[in-house]
Image: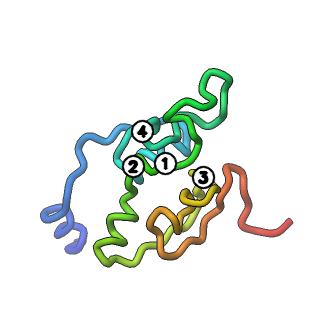
Amino acid sequence: PTPNLQAMAENGVRMSQYYTSPMSAPARAMLLTGNTSQQAGIGGMWWYENTIGKEGYELRLTDRVTTMAERFKDAGYNTLMAGKWHLGFTPGSTPKDRGFRHSFALMGGGASPVDD
């Protein structure tokens, strides 16, 4: 028996229209924001000549979207990010900038948690 999971299923919010991407960063952007990866600014994983400078392909979470962490933080929850981020390095797009009070993130797409 899992009474807490049962209570969450009975009383929680069900997200019934989630779509995803086969690529990691766009999928994370979609999950964190509830928007398409292009709306979030992560329309792809790399810059291609035909996407440079185009809205939706900034390769960082943009101010056009709000993350679930930002909403939780605004509601008084303590938020933590652990794992791969790969959603932007620039000021305004880091985990702490996007609502996570604490962050133990691997920032890039190919990072390692240990020193080699």
Q: Which residue is rendered at x = 36% and y = 72% of the image?
A: 73
Which residue position holds label 1? Answer: 62
The picture places residue 23, in percent across and down from the top left corner, at 55, 38
> Which quadrant of the figure contains the N terminus?
bottom left
- Do labels 2 and 4 touch, CB within 8 Å? yes
108 above or below 71? Answer: above
The picture places residue 112, in percent across and down from the top left corner, at 73, 61
- Do labels 3 and 1 touch, CB within 8 Å? no
> Which mark sits nearer the N-terminus, 2 or 3?
2
> Which mark sits nearer the N-terminus, 3 or 1?
1
Q: Which residue is rendered at x = 49% and y = 35% of the image?
A: 56
Which residue position holds label 2? Answer: 65
Callout 1, which amino acid? Answer: Thr
Tell me which corner region of the image, top left, top right, bottom left or bottom right, holds residue 17.
Answer: top left
Tell me which corner region of the image, top left, top right, bottom left or bottom right, holds residue 111.
Answer: bottom right
Instruction: Decide: few, some or many residues near mark 4? Use Cα within 10 Å; few <14, some 14-19, many ≥20.
Output: many
The picture places residue 18, in percent across and down from the top left corner, at 31, 42
- Do labels 2 and 1 touch, CB within 8 Å? yes
48 above or below 5? Answer: above
Q: Which mark is residue 39?
A: 4
Which secondary structure lies at badge 3?
A: loop
Which residue position holds label 3? Answer: 88
